[in-house]
Image (cartoon, grey):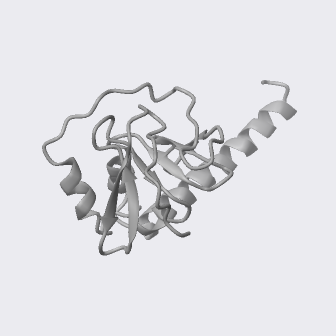
Amino acid sequence: MKDTIETLVCPACGKLMKKVYLNSQGFFIDVCTEGCGGVWFDNRELAKVDEKNEDIKELCEVYKGKTFSQVDKNAERKCPLCGQKMVKNSVSAKQEITIDECYKCGGKFFDYNELEQMRNQYENDKDRLADIKKLSESSVKMEKLLQELLKQDRF
């Protein structure tokens, strides 16, 4: 997706976001440098920086030495591009990290430090997929157990 030219307003704190060019990736991200430290990814950008080994040094430089304001992570947020109400979604196989996602334009908003947390969960896609496989196998086993308990009228 083509990067937006206009300056975006942070969906978490309302401050203007700064365009930060990720040189190794070849696109801009929007970072709330004067407010909460949140990061906006346009549709399909996140997949290029979601692994620990993918370069985001420009974002790290922006964060260096800064403190950011606290925001209510559970508050309803609107997409800074299209104004659509965003939906809370998990971005980790372990369901530990919840971000705001716009179903209309595909953008994703990470509160400060959530991107780092997500990137640090797995070394690469192979490790992430192995964990997803384990979790799905556990889910199937739980479903079978539940069905058996229901048959026995024990649940």
Q: Quadrant of residue 133?
A: bottom right
**60 or 119, which lies in front?**
60
Q: Is residue 60 left or right of residue 145?
A: left
Q: Is residue 36 above or below residue 54?
A: above
Q: Is residue 35 above or below residue 72?
A: below
For this orientation, the residue located farthest to the front is 6
Residue 15: where, in percent of width, then height? 38, 36
Residue 50 % position (x, y) = 41, 61
Q: Which residue is drawn at 33% across and 27% down?
A: 70
Q: How many marks?
A: 0
- Can you say which quadrant of the picture contains the N terminus? bottom right
| Residue 42, x across and y down, in percent | 51, 59
Q: Residue 105: x and y, percent? A: 64, 55
**For this view, does 64 lie left or right of residue 28?**
left
Q: In this view, does 53 lie to the left or right of 103?
A: left
For image coordinates 33% across by 35% down, the residue present is 36
Single out the residue that lies furthest toward the left: 65
Q: Residue at x 43, y 33 (%)?
A: 14
Q: Nearer the viewer, residue 121 or 27?
A: 27
107 up-or-down from 99: above or below: below
**On the image, which quarter does residue 29 sit in?**
bottom left
Q: Quadrant of residue 136?
A: bottom right
Quadrant of the frame with the C terminus: top right
